[in-house]
Image (spheres, grey):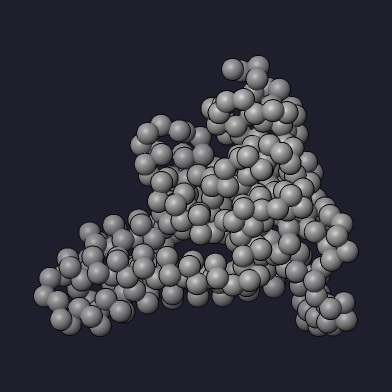
Amino acid sequence: MKRKKKKKPCYSGIGGQAVLEGIMMKNKDKYSVAVRTPDGDIDVTVEEYDSFAPSKILTEIPFIRGVFNFIDSLILGIRTLNYSASFYEEEEDTHKKDKILDRIFKDNAEKVLSTITVIVSVAIAIGFFILLPYYLSQLLGRFIVSDTAIAALEGVLRVLIFVLYIVLISCMKDIKRVFMYHGAEHKCINCIENGYELTVENVKHSSREHKRCGTSFLFFVVFLSVILFIFIRVEEPVARVAVRLLLIPVIASLAYEIIRLAGRTNNIIVRILSAPGMWLQRLTTREPDERMIEVGIAAVDAVFDWKEYLKNRADEL
């Protein structure tokens, strides 16, 4: 299908993530993982995901749903990463690891492993992006009189550490390929949401940046933490650390609501708010090759009827 002119984006509800040599796509409670296997084929698996939330209602209440959706994204992301990595592990090592885990945790091995990985990942992220900038600002703050200046310094350090982290990991060879698949994931979603048929050619000409990306979510988490920590102050050092930890769910919830709004709205204010996150995606995405795009299309096809979506979209316009 020849592309003629740019169409107005329309929310589809589908989201995804890059994995090792593949792409995960999620639509409602169903998700697919498409992986380019070592022999060159595309392996596609489809499963349903049960939310971490004790009740589905909690995933729909504004400013509460953000925390549960964030945890769900972490759990599903780690689960699908582990699944894609299994294609590239030595078969003997994989069987040994599975046997040990099954012996210890029995039927709950995968769930327990995912939970432990999520807890460790969150703890590292909190230490690296929340606590480290705080302690560095306090160390440098010995030479600064103004409390406001120290709070602003903490915010600057947090942004610098976040950007430096992205720049450093983007230099790693394996991560570069993941970022190429990340670009393919965005391009597939943008192709659909801009009203074009999901073909390799159309996907190639679509943008690799998307307003609902996890990179943008992380940017808003960092940005909102800078704002809140400047205005919310306590004198006691231990209490300051406690406040930063307690505000993390609040910050995550606010960031989720902004990202959710950005995915459904395209006015000038939303575009301005989304711009920094979109700029950062130039680091976390790379232009994919056609084989990567084919993997993305396979992942979308498995969980989303894009032809019906385009038909309904055309009827509404």
161 to the left or right of 91: left
Frontmost residue, 265 versus 47 = 265
Frontmost residue, 39 versus 312 = 39
Q: Which residue is drawn at 67% across and 41% down?
A: 203
216 to the left or right of 230: right
Q: Which residue is drawn at 40% across and 51% down?
A: 276
Q: Position of residue 181 (x, y in %)?
A: 67, 56
Identify the image quadrant of residue 205.
Answer: top right
Frontmost residue, 82 versus 284 = 284
Q: Where is residue 303 in the image (x, y as percent from the top left)?
A: 76, 42
121 to the left or right of 315: left
Identify the image quadrant of residue 272.
Answer: top left
Query: Is the C terminus in the top left, top right, bottom left or bottom right quadrant?
Result: top right
Whether residue 304 can be seen here: no
Q: Where is residue 119 in the image (x, y as percent from the top left)?
A: 57, 72
Query: Is the N terminus in the top left, top right, bottom left or bottom right quadrant?
Result: top right
Location of residue 278 with respect to 106 vertically, above or below: above
Whether residue 276 can be seen here: yes
Q: Which residue is drawn at 30% across and 79% down?
A: 136
